[in-house]
Amino acid sequence: MGRSPCCDEIHVKKGPWAPEEDKKLVEYIQLHGHRRSWRELPKNAGLNRCGKSCRLRWTNYLRPDIKRGKLSEEEEGLIVQLHSALGNKWSKISTHLPGRTDNEIKNYWNTHLRKKLLRVGIDPVTHQRTTDLDLLSRLPNLLAATAKLGNLDNALRLHADAVARYQMLKGLITLMTPSVLPPNTDAMNRLGLLASPGRYDLLQQNDQLEGLVNGSLAFGQDQMLPTTPGLLGLVNPNTPSSSHASPVSRIPHEMMMMMMMKSSYDGSSTLTDSNSGITTPGFSSLDMPAAHSTPSSVSVSPENEAADFVQGACGTNASTPSQGWQGLNLGEPDEDFSWKDILDQTSWWEES
DNA sequence: AATTCGTTCAACCGCGACTGG
DNA sequence: ACCAGTCGCGGTTGAACGAAT
């Protein structure tokens, strides 16, 4: 015989609370408190509710110290930090945010923060950076699938896009590497890289990415992707892939900032580099749009993944990619500057 | 204007932890 | 040590609402 449920009383009201019920509950608790027994409370207060429901209503809604309104950026940041340390311990997290309930924080996490983290390629469970580099590492297979579908132009395009994206990632790594530039902790913080082991994942995957950029990775089982003249030339072929003096690491700081601007969202916040004083408009680590990041959910099956990716990145009409890896687009005449601009600029730098 | 779809959040449910007899 | 009652937590649900079609 199992334990009888708390709310097995017949005729006990459920659902949304009426204003009169709220009034009764508040008046009773103000007069008598709730320490003795939640179970007895509704009977004594003249409420047709179970004690559990009363407790929930009080702690999540009627308590006088509850803070109302949208969570501030500081509170958001604190939640993310605490969640990375504590996991789904909403009650513990809420003790660090006065006036916020565990339920509110849990809801806010599930409806806002989780999605924001996914958008910038951070796994909300592990708090590690995953998607971009995971997808890049699978790019050879995806390119093979593209080529097999007979769309080699788009495959080449993807390859070129991968080069551009790789260079941006390199730039980000450069930004975070003290030997090259003083660490920009503000930028790193905003990217969620300071507390995240993802930075090290990022660095560890360098060699694999290098191979991809140099065109040395076979794509598919029986095909080798032809090199892309001009684009692959951006990376000095004489530089050993293992060398720390990769030409990309010598991209000037301004170029780096330009790359970051390119990958940033047109939001209201700004990113200021404390070293150079350069301010990058529209940079918001938690507000980067899906349009400039990889899809948050990727099909499990390799075939589906490839098909989705190809359809998304190339589209049935190559000029209007509609889903998938939308951020990779070399021809963006409507924008202030494009990936092509960045590559052109980078090319100029490499030649000088 | 009507309908569908997506998002939000208050409230519920079930389970484990705690407590007192 | 055991047990029943109670509390608190975290996952889930569904009504309400706004946006899109």
Image (tube, coloured by chain):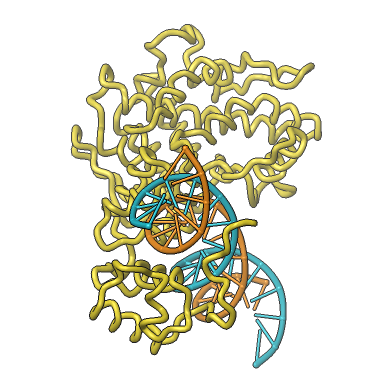
Chain colours: A yellow, B cyan, C orange
Residue A2 falls in image quadrant: bottom right
Task: Give the vertical position of C19 relative to A109 (above or below).
Answer: below
Residue A145 falls in image quadrant: top right
Q: Tell me residue A157's x, y (percent).
A: 63, 34
Q: Is residue A76 left or right of residue A170?
A: left
Residue B6 falls in image quadrant: bottom right
Q: Tell me residue A293's x, y (percent).
A: 52, 43
Front residue of this view, candidates A295 and A102:
A102
Q: Quadrant location of the N terminus of chain A?
A: bottom right
Q: Tell me residue A71's x, y (percent).
A: 32, 61
Q: Residue at x 28, y 77 (%)?
A: A29
Q: Is residue A334 left or right of residue A187?
A: right
Q: Tell me residue A253's x, y (percent).
A: 29, 29
Q: Quadrant location of the C terminus of chain A?
A: top left
Q: Is residue A96 left or right of residue A102?
A: left
Answer yes or no: is residue A282 visible. no
Front residue of this view, candidates A336 and A303:
A303
